[in-house]
Image (cartoon, grey):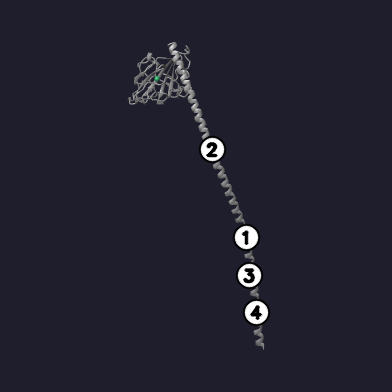
Amino acid sequence: MEEQQRDKDALEEKQAKVKKNLEKLNGMLKELEDLKADLNSQKAQKNEAMKNVKAEQAGISDEKKSLEAEISKLNAKQLEIQGAISTEESRIAEEARKAEEAEKAKATARVHEASNSSGTTSSGTTSSGTKTASKSSSPGKSKVTTTYHKPSAPVGKAPAVSSGMFTRPASGIFTSGFGTRWGAMHNGVDIAAGKGTPIVAAASGTVEVSTFGSPGNWGGYGNVIIINHGNGYKTLYGHMSSRSVGVGTKVSKGQVIGAMGNTGDVVAGKGGDGTHLHFEIFKNGSRVNPAGYINL
Ligand SMILES: [Zn+2]
């Protein structure tokens, strides 16, 4: 009996242990379920957030698209405006060209009349030694073109410096003189040689003009330099291919100031490209015949 009772006690003890373990396991299971529920809730929140982000991205993408459309519209508008501007610029340039042509024709007519009626080329002669050389608005401003010159002419060397007030400004062939030519006044002399032939200062002085002529400012002369020698004398060098001295530069007689070329209004044709030096001498603001000053 005693043994039976012991077995029963042992069994009950075992059952109690199993029950306790079961309760413990149930507790753990409950915790796991809670944890799982928690995770699911977090996942749901994340999904919600992702949805919002995606919606936001879609919104941004739409906004970007509409901005791009706006930009391309603006670009098209800009092109249209630029087109209108360049059309307007061409129109203005064409008008300026026509006005310049009309002005040239008028100036030519004036020069022709003047040389026919008075036989003199001077206008506004003054004894002032400081008067600046006549600007291109002076009579004969467009008569800087010349006769045909051979492009194959050899490139000359700088001429030997002569004694006297002025030295020859370039080596080459004397092709056109001072005076009425083709019914209009030619304001200087032309010396032709190959393009690039050095041009030298006819006398010492200070560079007063060094520019590429434009309407109202030595138009037609191309690359042009004017040197003030003092005592009322100035010399002008036109149509140069390049200029090597700027305004204010002090130059000495025989110093290279540029190279012979065919810039500005020159007559090219008959196998020539118009390369030559157009040389003028001003005395007290009026042009004088350079042949009286240099050996040609
Ligand atoms: Zn000339």
Quarter of the N terminus within the rendering: bottom right
Q: Amino acid at mark 3?
A: Leu
Spot occupied by residue 62 in the image (x, y as percentages of width and height): 58, 49
Q: Amino acid at mark 4?
A: Gln
Quarter of the C terminus within the rendering: top left
User: What residue is disc 3 on?
Assistant: 29
Q: Amino acid at mark 2?
A: Gln
Spot occupied by residue 154 in the image (x, y as percentages of width and height): 32, 25
User: What residue is disc 2 on?
Assistant: 78
Q: Earlier in the sequence, mark 2 or mark 3?
A: 3
Look at the numbered discs 1 and 2 and tell me whether their residues touch, using CB distance below 8 Å: no
Foreground mark, 4 or 2, reads: 2
**Mark 2 Cα within 10 Å, few/some/many (few <14, many 20+)?**
few
Q: Earlier in the sequence, mark 4 or mark 1?
A: 4
Foreground mark, 1 or 2, reads: 2
Position above or below: 75 against 56 = above
Q: Could you say which disc has been placed on residue 44 in the image? A: 1
Identified at 53% across, 37% down, the residue is: 80
**Mark 3 Cα within 10 Å, few/some/many (few <14, many 20+)?**
few
Q: Earlier in the sequence, mark 4 or mark 2?
A: 4
Q: Earlier in the sequence, mark 3 or mark 1?
A: 3
User: What residue is disc 4 on?
Assistant: 15
Instruction: Report the side of 8 relative to 66 (left or right).
Output: right
